[in-house]
Image (spheres, helix red, strand yellow):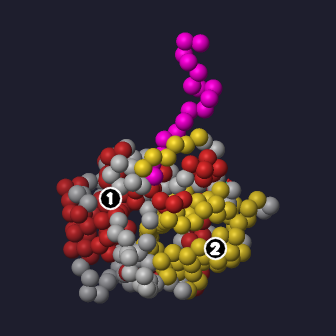
Amino acid sequence: MTEQSEPLEVRDRALEVVGLTRAYGEFYALRNISWSVDEGTWWGIIGPNGSGKSTLLHLLSGVDQPTSGNVHIYGKRVGSYSRKELSRLIAVLQQEGLPPVGYTVREVVEMGRFPHQDWLGREKGVDVEAITDRVLERLGLTTLADRALDRLSGGQRQRVALAKVMVQEPRILLLDEPTTYLDLRYQLEFMELLADWRQETGVTIIAVLHDLNLTAQFCDDLLVLKDGMIEGLGASSKLLTEDRIRRVYGVEPVMLPHPDSGVPQLLLRRSASDTTDSTD
Ligand code: ADP
Ligand code: MG
């Protein structure tokens, strides 16, 4: 992660949210969220189960509408884009990125170009096969290109989902707990692939993440949600404090600096009743 030290750097505002509220009847899943995201930044959204993280992502991607407030993508209301225009700007990757259907890896990855194609599936001046080949190569998927998706492991399938959004070439990528079902190695690999891609293309990343240690290592900034409200907003190194983790998650944390980078890392204390001497 490179820190931009230029004080007067002007970046495009990729996304802006003002007074966003989403209610289901009497219940407020999100309340009065105001937030702006500069192009090229990597934000993490964290918070306990049910705090409104997925609801927020659905509003950002335009698949759900707020009860009040609004979302602007590159200065225009999200609802004023056509579905296809929006898909050229925003890609979404879910917890289980792709259903294990019978398509081959190559077929699925090529579908990522859909927002750029006309109704006959054509795209002027773009060699879809070449773009696809490049991404498959980069993600180490070349030898799996003709394999059906249902013949892949969860980790491989998640990499294919990433390949598909890379081929889509969005300016903003939204992810909802993309590493939840991956083992440690695949989790780290997935985050590193994202980091490299961002470095190279300047894509803006907004990711709901459960693992606070990975979050601290990869995200510049954090939006912390609790009960549908913003509990913290800003640099992840400043926000990940013992106090806040205790308040937001109701656990007893110990924060230590990562030996490599100094970013905060989390350990959990067992509750008092669990730590009684076993010889008692
Ligand atoms: P998170 O992703 O942080 O776990 P969600 O955004 O999925 O939380 O949900 C936030 C709250 O909104 C939860 O209490 C959930 O039960 C509620 N909720 C989500 N979708 C609906 C819905 N369609 N109808 C009623 N309540 C909902
Ligand atoms: Mg969720």
Q: Nearer the viewer, residue 221 or 170?
A: 221
In the rendered image, the quadrant that contains the N terminus is bottom left
Q: Residue at left 34%, top 69%?
A: 2
Rendering coords of residue 261 (x, y %): 35, 55
In the rendered image, the quadrant that contains the C terminus is top right
Q: Which mark is residue 253?
A: none
Nearer-N-terminus badge (2/1) = 2
Q: Residue furthest top?
A: 279
**The image quarter in which residue 269 lies:** top right
Q: What residue would you read off at disc 1?
A: 192
Rendering coords of residue 9 (x, y %): 42, 84
Rendering coords of residue 60 (x, y %): 56, 71
Q: Neighbour class for label 2 at 10 Å: few (<14), some, many (≥20)?
A: some
Image quarter for ligand 1 equals bottom right
Q: Secondary structure at mark 2?
A: strand
The magenta stretch spans residue 34: no
Q: Is residue 84 visible?
A: no
Q: What residue would you read off at disc 2?
A: 34
Q: Secondary structure at mark 1?
A: helix
Q: Are marks 2 and 1 in contact (CB under 8 Å)?
A: no
Label 2 beta carbon less than 8 Å to ligand 1: no
| Amino acid identity at mark 1 | Glu
**Compared to 105, does 275 lie above or below?**
above
Q: Residue at left 54%, top 59%?
A: 239
Q: Residue at left 37%, top 44%?
A: 183
| Amino acid identity at mark 2 | Ser
Q: Which residues are magenta?
A: 264-280
